[in-house]
């Protein structure tokens, strides 16, 4: 029997609902498989925990977190605690502290989903830099002026662009598109472009292009069928992937893998959406982003058959359309949709 130890951070709002359902799905996959087991350590770190303790996680939080095979996160952030505190004091320290410098976000119109675009050929991957860039947190604020810095290092920029090429090559993609804005960002993005040019030269077989982020946002809408691999900085990748998930019908669809490729630290998987205070407590959060994140986690744990089984079950439920949540046009609930997915698994 293989035992996987998972650290869970459900977080706030709908994060709690989707992680609860994620655990039910994992248990069903373990039952079906017969040879694997999941052991959960649920950590209460959240905005509610912050209001009680004055911190987003305990001082030894990173040591507690490190001791596992993988981390599963719902979402953090809730009215009453400023968003920059919940994000900067929990999520970002994990991503940077565990050197999860790759943020992988597949954008794929699964069978059964209907895109709001007049296009059903949407299947690409965004690789987002996840450890520095615009989210480095440096800067100063005075009464009259705020300065927000970005940090792009050669090491950080080169490794993420190279990872995108290697992933593209390994997955039979033919082109890589870099998101830039070097017309306005004369330091950071000129540097990004220069390193992109250096790395692309190592992959002559791959079609390489770059596009300014504003034009690229339009291109996502007009020509998603032309996209295969998009590599972007921390901020640009963040924005582009909410757009990408919305192109699939809902922000509740897409997953996100915060990956430490060297395996020195655990990776962390989560849906791309936030805690959605506007629907929290209503039981209607779409759990697909979390299920897909779990499938990505299972692939990383080398449990591909279970990952495939889960995604097949999700697609079957989407195609039937009977149990789907309101964000994608259904009348179902989070729990009901999970019940349907589990019924397909077992
Ligand atoms: P959000 O992603 O929470 O919500 C945006 C919109 O999408 C809302 O209308 C929401 O109802 C809808 N939505 C999101 N997920 C859904 C799902 N699974 N099913 C159905 N509808 C869904 O983004 P927002 O409103 O900007 O942020 C809310 C809070 O979440 C903030 O505190 C923010 O800082 C935090 N946040 C946390 C993230 C994380 O923990 N990784 C990521 C993004 C935001
Ligand atoms: Mg985001």
Image (cartoon, rainbow, N blue to C red):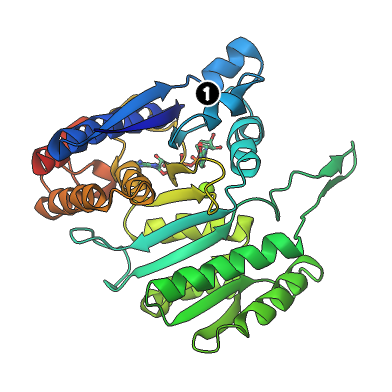
Q: Quadrant of residue 60?
A: top right
Badge 1 element: loop
Q: The C terminus is located in which quarter?
A: top left
Q: Is residue 153 left or right of residue 226?
A: right
From the top left corner, tell me how far across and down residue 222 is, in percent.
42, 76
At x 68%, y 64%, the residue is 157
Any part of residue 104 in sight: yes
Any part of residue 333 in sight: no
Which residue is tagged 1? Answer: 46
Depth check: give the residue in front, 300 or 83.
300
Q: Is residue 53 left or right of residue 167?
A: right
| Residue positioned most to the bottom | 204
From the top left corner, tell me how far across and down residue 194 is, in percent.
73, 77
At x 46%, y 68%, the residue is 167
From the top left corner, tell me how far across and down residue 111 is, in percent.
19, 61
Q: Is mark 1 within 8 Å of ligand 1?
A: no
Residue 179 vs 246, above or below: the answer is below
Residue 197 vs 339, above or below: the answer is below
């Amino acid at each position: 029997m293989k035992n996987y130890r998972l650290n869970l951070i459900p977080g706030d709002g709908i994060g709690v609902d989707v992680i609860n359902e994620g655990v039910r799905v994992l248990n069903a996959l373990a039952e079906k498989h017969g040879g694997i087991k999941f052991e959960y350590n649920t950590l209460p770190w959240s905005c509610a925990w912050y209001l009680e303790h004055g911190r987003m996680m305990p001082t030894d939080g990173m040591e507690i977190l490190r001791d596992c095979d993988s981390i599963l996160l719902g979402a953090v952030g809730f009215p009453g605690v400023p968003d920059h505190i919940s994000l900067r004091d929990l999520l970002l320290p994990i991503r940077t502290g565990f050197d999860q410098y790759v943020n992988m976000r597949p954008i794929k119109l699964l069978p059964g989903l209907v895109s709001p675009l007049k296009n059903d050929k949407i299947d690409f991957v965004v690789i987002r830099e996840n450890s520095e860039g615009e989210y480095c947190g440096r800067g100063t604020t005075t009464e009259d002026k705020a300065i927000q810095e970005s940090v792009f290092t050669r090491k950080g920029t080169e490794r993420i662009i190279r990872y995108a090429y290697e992933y593209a090559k390994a997955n039979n993609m033919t082109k890589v598109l870099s998101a830039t804005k070097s017309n306005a960002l004369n330091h950071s993005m000129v540097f990004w472009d220069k390193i992109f040019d250096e790395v692309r030269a190592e992959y002559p077989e791959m079609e390489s292009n770059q596009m300014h982020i504003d034009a690229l946002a339009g291109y996502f809408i007009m020509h998603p069928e032309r996209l295969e691999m998009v590599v972007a900085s921390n901020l640009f990748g963040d924005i582009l992937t909410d757009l990408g998930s919305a192109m699939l019908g809902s922000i509740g669809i897409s997953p996100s893998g915060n990956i430490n490729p060297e395996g020195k630290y655990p990776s962390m998987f989560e849906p791309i959406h936030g805690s959605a205070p506007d629907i929290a407590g209503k039981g209607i959060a779409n759990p697909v982003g979390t299920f897909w994140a779990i499938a990505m986690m299972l692939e990383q744990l080398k449990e591909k058959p279970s990952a495939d089984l889960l995604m097949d079950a999700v697609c079957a439920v989407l195609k039937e359309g009977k149990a789907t949540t309101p964000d994608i046009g259904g009348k179902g609930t989070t729990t009901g949709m999970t019940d349907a997915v589990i019924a397909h698994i077992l």
